[in-house]
Image: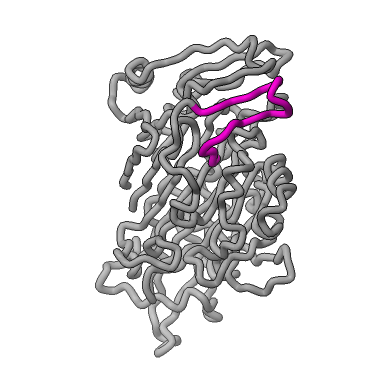
């Protein structure tokens, strides 16, 4: 499987494309290979960005975007908005998206979701506020069920979580975490039986009535789906699992849907490890001879790709520790595949909100603790800024070589984390 990151402007607009290793060359109606999950992050292509009034803040790109209109891209599964500030939530650019798309959903932090709904460009059922992540609330993570690539294959899953800083007056500091476990075209081998003895998978869409709970050794489990409650009157069975056990309608023709309810039930085990909650999977009996058929355990989930997007930075301790230990670890999503985080440190006076961009110090803390394999710079464009809000800005810029040297020292001289700056239009592909 692979993750492609394409930088669409000189600042912090990215197209993320997660693909399974078995992706077919054929494309679906949306121009994507089967099993693909794509995310468009913070689109701002052209035109000024104004906060409140041009006299307070007016920003302009100094580097032209690599595309002139979002219609030049394949339709993404998700448009992800990290802030309500106009350089992240840019109304003229968002209006370039097709409001009638049956594939794309807009997921935004609460303030941005309110702003986008106020545009009245998208149907209200397509714009959703991201819940704040809580390790105690399963429904604080939005989950996408990705159907198998062929009959008998295993389904995949993508998750999106929003982790904001606590008591952040500026509202700038947060992180958006994405994980992707690919679907497969054939059953995966079991941990407990040879491949030659592996029985056939049952139909994933129909729970087996003969299944009985058992305890398994602690292992990174699939995310247990919940029975959704529709946010609208739609009875479309293809949905996106979200907070408060509710659901977001998606097109039946989309390759990303909600997992069928009760297929993989979750039960408590007293033997679970502190970081790996135990999931009890049932026995699957052969319908041809259910009285004598042997049982088998569902195989260990495939390695999961993971990405953390934090353009302004967020301290690892205490904010990201629960997400790392209670979500990334159980999903076998570490080491972190990619960190998208700024290099430059930007400070305002305390009465103007204080720190604007955490820069290298914050990025290194995250990269080291999550064992990031790749760190991609973001939000460091030398924009043309004017207004009261930037009059007292203090900026400390870091070059690529300087960042690499800092990372090398922090990682003990090992080259475990590749540091990159993607030029506008440049694409980077990372494989698991």
390 left or right, relative to 370: right
Magenta residues? 42-61
Q: Is residue 69 left or right of residue 119?
A: left
Q: Position of residue 53 (x, y in %)?
A: 72, 26
Left/right placement of residue 66 relative to residue 162 reads: left
Rendered residue at 46%/40% (across/down): 14
Residue 353 visible somewhere in the drawing: yes
Q: How is the image coloured?
A: one colour
Q: Left or right: 348 with respect to 373? A: right
Q: Residue furthest bottom?
A: 288
Residue 393 horizontal/vertical position (percent) = 60, 12
Up the image or down, 367 lies above or below 193; here it is above
Where residue 192 appears, as percent x and y from the top left, is 34, 63
Quadrant position of residue 209: bottom right
Residue 47 drawn in magenta: yes
Residue shown at the point (35%, 20%) measured from the top left: 400
Task: In this rendered view, identify the residue nearer to me: 122 or 69.
Answer: 69
Is most of the magenta stretch helix, strand or loop?
Answer: loop
For residue 219, say whether it is visible. Answer: no
Q: Residue furthest left?
A: 196
**Residue 124 vs residue 20, the one in the foreground:** 124
Q: Nearer the viewer, residue 30 or 258?
A: 30
State the image quarter where residue 290 is shown: bottom left
Placement of 287 over or under 14, stated as above or below = below
In the image, residue 244 above or below residue 172: below
- Residue 116 included in the magenta stretch of the image: no
At horizontal 37% and vertical 55% (from top left) the residue drawn is: 19
Picture residue at 48% right of the left edge, 30% below the top: 11
Where is 350 relative to 164, above or below?
A: above
Give the x, y percent position of residue 85.
65, 33
Quarter-wise, where is residue 347 in the image?
Answer: top right
């Amino acid at each position: 499987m692979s993750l492609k990151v394409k930088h669409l402007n000189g600042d912090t607009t990215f197209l993320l494309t997660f693909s399974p290793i078995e992706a077919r060359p054929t494309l679906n109606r949306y121009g994507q290979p089967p099993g693909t999950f794509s995310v468009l992050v913070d689109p701002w292509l052209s035109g000024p960005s104004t906060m409140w009034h041009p006299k307070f803040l007016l920003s302009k790109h100094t580097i032209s975007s690599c595309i002139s209109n979002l219609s030049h891209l394949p339709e993404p599964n998700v448009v992800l908005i990290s802030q309500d500030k106009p350089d992240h939530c840019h109304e003229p650019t968002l209006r370039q998206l097709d409001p009638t798309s049956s594939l794309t959903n807009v997921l935004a932090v609460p303030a941005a979701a309110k702003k986008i709904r106020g545009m009245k460009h998208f149907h209200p059922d397509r714009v959703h506020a991201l819940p704040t992540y809580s390790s105690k609330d399963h429904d604080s993570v939005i989950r996408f069920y990705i159907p198998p690539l062929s009959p008998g294959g295993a389904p995949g899953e993508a998750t999106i979580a929003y982790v904001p800083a606590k008591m952040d007056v500026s509202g700038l500091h947060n992180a958006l975490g994405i994980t992707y476990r690919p679907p497969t075209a054939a059953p995966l081998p079991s941990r407990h039986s040879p491949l030659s003895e592996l029985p056939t998978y049952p139909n994933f869409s129909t729970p087996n009535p003969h299944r009985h709970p058992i305890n398994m050794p602690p292992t990174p489990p699939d995310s247990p789906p919940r029975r959704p409650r529709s946010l609208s009157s739609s009875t479309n069975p293809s949905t996106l699992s979200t907070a408060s056990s509710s659901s977001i309608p998606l097109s039946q023709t989309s390759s990303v849907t909600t997992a069928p309810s009760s297929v993989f039930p979750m039960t408590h085990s007293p033997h679970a490890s502190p970081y790996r909650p135990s999931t009890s999977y049932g026995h699957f009996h052969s319908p041809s001879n259910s009285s004598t058929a042997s049982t088998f355990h569902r195989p260990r989930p495939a390695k999961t790709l993971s990405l953390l997007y934090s353009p302004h930075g967020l301290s690892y301790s205490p904010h990201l520790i629960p997400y790392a230990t209670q979500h990334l670890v159980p999903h076998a999503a570490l080491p972190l595949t990619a960190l998208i985080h700024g290099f430059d440190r930007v400070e305002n006076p305390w009465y103007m909100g204080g720190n604007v961009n955490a820069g290298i110090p914050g990025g290194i803390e995250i990269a080291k603790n999550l064992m990031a394999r790749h760190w991609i710079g973001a939000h460091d464009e030398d924009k043309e800024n004017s207004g009261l809000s930037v009059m007292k800005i203090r900026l400390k810029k870091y070059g690529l070589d300087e960042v690499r040297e800092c990372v090398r020292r922090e990682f003990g001289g090992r080259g475990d984390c590749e540091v990159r700056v993607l030029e506008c239009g440049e694409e980077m592909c990372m494989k698991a």
